[in-house]
Image (spheres, rainbow, N blue to C red):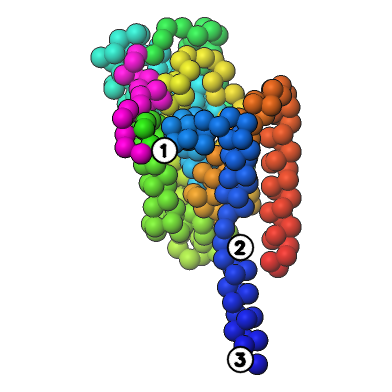
Amino acid sequence: MTVAIQGGSERARAVALVRRVNFAVVVFLALYVAVGLLQPNYLEPAGAMNFLRRAAPLAILASGQLFVLVSGGFDLSVGSLVTLTVIGGSMLTANDPSKTWSTIAILYAIGLFVGLINGAVVAYLKTPSIIATLGTLLSVNGAAMMWSGGSPRGYLPDNFRMFGRFVFHDVPVIGIFPLAVAVLVAICALAQWGLHGTVFGRRVLAVGDNPRAAELAGVRVEFVRLGVFVISALSAVTAGVMLGGFGGVSVDVGRGLELQAIAACVVGGVQLLGGRGTVVGAVAGALTLTALFALLTLLGLPQPLKDTAQGFILIAAVAIGAWRRRRAV
């Protein structure tokens, strides 16, 4: 009898351990191995670092989107804010490296303003977040097009682009270490602490789980909703600065990124109705999407098929999440 009880408890612990492993991590590792089999340099330390550098902007964007999603909302404006950041960076610096830091400060101020507008409309005017941020998406994208005249103008100075391009060489063991990876680690650590290690983070989760109960418990729901949209907007500016470093000035740089960020979070186990989600899951989801896109590119598949795959993954992840919630009940 004792042996049977011990065997049952060991199986229960094993099942609990398996359940704690994020599904997105497993999928990412499988996809990355597949990519490595097609392109062996991905399995080398330098190749892995370059992969993380390419994935960093989406992972940062997903980390900010996570706060909005777990609070029970959506932020569709982040892609247009990325575009505005890249275009605004080129317009404000005017090819002058001495203006880089003041330009970055202005861009973060613009992001703060956009986040406050989104948060205020959702929190105080009680507008559904998907509608409010869709309006912001159109407005910010229109402002970016008017600012640039509808086409790329100028270029970004090297000290602006270093966040996406600069690489430390001759690093022991790994060979190279991109600055973008350091930024990714710092942002993710900050997001992890903010969501899971602070009172504000616990309030975000409480509002997403049950806003009425949170309000009765003394949580300032409006302030929390205002805060999560500011965090999301600032993460979009950070991703925009990094993407400007990768590819330079483009009016399409942020197109579709809002959906990719939401898809990354959902793949990582974030509950769309709010109340549940982790930074590890959001980042793992972003890495999974990046690995999938790399795999499809190596297979020579066209862009429309990549979009189809992204949509299928989003639908499947939502369906699996709903199924798990029903099983838990």
Camera-side residue of 209 and 223: 209
What residue is pinned by disc 2?
19
Q: CA distance from mark 2 to mark 3?
A: 26 Å
**Range of the magenta residues?**
157-173
Is 46 above or below relative to 12? above
Disc 1: CA contacts within 10 A as few (<14), some (14-19) or many (>=20): many
**Residue placed at 47% from the left, 14% from the top?**
249
Q: Which mark sits nearer the N-terminus, 2 or 3? A: 3
Q: Specify the quadrant of the image occupied by residue 90.
A: top left
For the residue pair 181 and 87, the one nearer the viewer reads as 181
In terms of image quadrants, where is residue 287?
top right
What residue is at 42 percent from the left and 7 percent from the top?
154
Q: The residue tagged with tag 1: helix, strand or loop?
A: helix
Label drawn at residue 184: 1
Amino acid beneath label 1: Leu
Q: Which mark is residue 2?
A: 3
Residue 73 tag number: none
Marks 3 and 2: in contact by CB < 8 Å?
no
